[in-house]
C-alpha cells in the first residue's frame, strides 16, 4: 500500500531574481501526483515562469534536463498564482528541481512549489 505525501521542491521564499531550487530525490515516489505552485501576484510588468528539471544523479554526471513540465506564466494581470499540474512520477528521473525565472522587475516575488504524490512502501 502506498501513502500520499508532500515534498517541498522549492521552499517558500521571496526572491527578487531568478532562482534554481535544490535537487530533491523522488525515487521513492510512484504513480500519479501533482505539482503545486503557490505564488503571489507579481508587480506590474513582472512575470514568473517555473519549470521542472530532472537528472539521474542530481547533475553529477547526468546534466539537468527539462522534464517537459512547466506552469503557465504568472503575471500581474492574470492572477493565476495558484496552479496545479498533474504528473506521472514514474516518467521522471530520480532527482528533480525547479527553475523559477523572474523577469520585468526586481520586486520580491514570493512563491513555493510542492510535489504531492504516492510514496511506495
Image: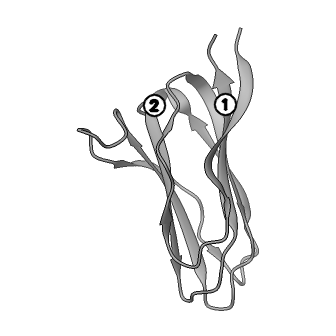
> Label 1: how many residues lie within 10 Å, few (<14), some (14-19) or many (20+)?
many
In the depicted structure, whether residue 25 falls above or below residue 45: above
Can you identify the residue that label 2 sits on? 91
In the depicted structure, whether residue 107 falls above or below residue 91: below
Q: Which of 7 and 45 is in front in this view?
A: 7
How far from the left and from the top, in percent, is residue 92? 45, 34
Disc number placed over residue 17 in the picture, else none:
none
Quarter where residue 87 is shown: top right
How far from the left and from the top, in percent, is residue 11? 65, 53
In the depicted structure, whether residue 62 falls above or below residue 66: above
Which quarter of the image is occupied by the N terminus? top right
Q: Name, please, the residue furthest toward the left.
A: 61
Q: Is mark 2 on a helix, strand or loop?
A: helix
> Label 2: how many residues lie within 10 Å, few (<14), some (14-19) or many (20+)?
few
Q: Which of 78 and 56 is in front in this view?
A: 56
Seen at 67% across and 64% down, the residue is: 13
Can you identify the residue that label 1 sits on? 117
Seen at 61% across and 91% down, the residue is: 45
Seen at 58% across and 73% down, the residue is: 48
Q: Do the residues labelled 1 and 2 touch (CB within 8 Å)?
A: no
Amino acid at each position: 500500500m502506498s501513502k500520499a505525501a508532500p515534498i517541498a521542491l522549492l521552499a517558500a521564499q521571496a526572491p527578487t531574481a531568478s532562482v534554481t531550487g535544490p535537487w530533491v530525490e523522488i525515487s521513492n515516489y510512484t504513480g500519479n501526483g501533482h505539482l503545486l505552485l503557490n505564488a503571489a501576484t507579481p508587480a506590474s510588468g513582472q512575470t514568473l515562469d517555473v519549470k521542472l528539471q530532472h537528472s539521474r544523479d542530481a547533475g553529477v554526471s547526468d546534466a539537468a534536463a527539462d522534464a517537459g513540465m512547466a506552469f503557465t506564466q504568472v503575471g500581474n494581470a492574470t492572477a493565476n498564482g495558484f496552479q496545479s499540474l498533474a504528473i506521472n512520477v514514474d516518467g521522471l528521473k530520480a532527482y528533480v528541481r525547479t527553475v523559477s525565472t523572474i523577469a520585468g522587475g526586481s520586486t520580491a516575488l514570493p512563491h513555493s512549489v510542492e510535489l504531492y504524490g504516492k510514496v511506495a512502501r
